[in-house]
Image (cartoon, rainbow, N blue to C red):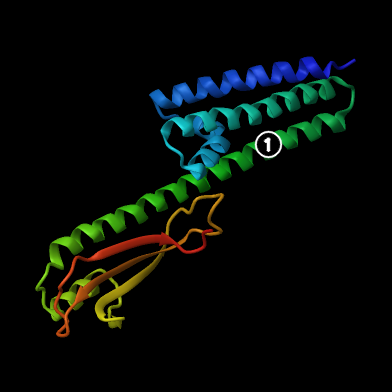
Amino acid sequence: MLNWKKLWIFAIVGGFASAVVFAAIEGVRHNDIIAVAQFPGWVVGAALDRGELAFEIVLVLVNTICYAVLFAGLILLVRAVKRPNGFVRALVVVLICALAWFGVRQYRSWITCKRRGEQFNQRAEQLERNAKNRLKVGTHKSDVAQFFAENGIPVTFDRIGYTTFAMGTIYTSGCGPVLVCGSDRALIGLRVEVDSEGSVKGKPEVVPMYTDCL
């Protein structure tokens, strides 16, 4: 007779211990296999974005739940495999392989997204640095237009209220927060105040943002 209480106590304790050990190992040295195992906690912790301590706590708690469910499932699968039923054994093998394939695929997708997000942030930061160095007060209109062109930004000189701006937008992609954004679509906007002749008269502003977020 299966004792469900003991099963879940064992699963939760084992899950918590595994989550703590994996987090400690990953904190000392990155390992791809451990990173795959920590994927659920990484996603939720990164989406909440409440600081490093909160991230570690969420990472451990979420992975504890996932590992506990996994351990309980494995125990039940082992009990099923012990029964003389070839179909059940084959089903268990297929299920384990499918879960492993799904985990690796999700991890690779997450790594690609993370790299894309880093590139998006770096591009915005580089554009902001260059704009501050090149678009200084007094810079002529032709040089402003050239700067926008060099960075692949279509420029327009538009009046907003009583102020005229040189402005443009790059549409790109990054790695949007999972629980907040519906996609990874993003943009980087650049604008700088200019006078009636199109020469710079204010500080440039660079605004990176994801477009499909709450």
Kindly identify which residue carries mark 1: 97
- Place of residue 32 in the rendered image (x, y in percent of width and height, measured from the top left): 47, 33
Q: Nearer the viewer, residue 116 or 153?
A: 153
Q: Is residue 137 left or right of residue 157?
A: left
Q: Is residue 148 left or right of residue 22?
A: left
Which residue appears at 41% of the width and 52% of the height? 117
Residue furthest to the bottom = 197
Q: Nearer the viewer, residue 204 or 65?
A: 204
Counting every numbered tag in the picture gives 1
- Place of residue 205 in the rendered image (x, y in percent of width and height, measured from the top left): 26, 64
Q: Is residue 8 left or right of residue 32?
A: right
Q: Nearer the viewer, residue 89 or 62?
A: 62
- Place of residue 144 in the rendered image (x, y in percent of width and height, measured from the top left): 17, 75
Q: Quadrant of the N terminus?
A: top right
211 vs 122: above or below: below
Q: For the residue carrying disc 1, how many other residues have a C-alpha within 10 Å: few (<14), some (14-19), or many (20+)?
A: few
Which residue appears at 42% of the width and 33% of the height? 52
- Place of residue 155 in the rendered image (x, y in percent of width and height, measured from the top left): 28, 78
Quadrant hosting residue 25: top left
160 vs 182: above or below: below
Residue furthest to the left = 138
Which residue appears at 53% of the width and 41% of the height? 43
Q: Quadrant of the C terminus?
A: bottom right
Identity of the amino acid at label 1? Cys
Which residue appears at 69% of the width and 28% of the height? 70
Which secondary structure, mark 1? Answer: helix
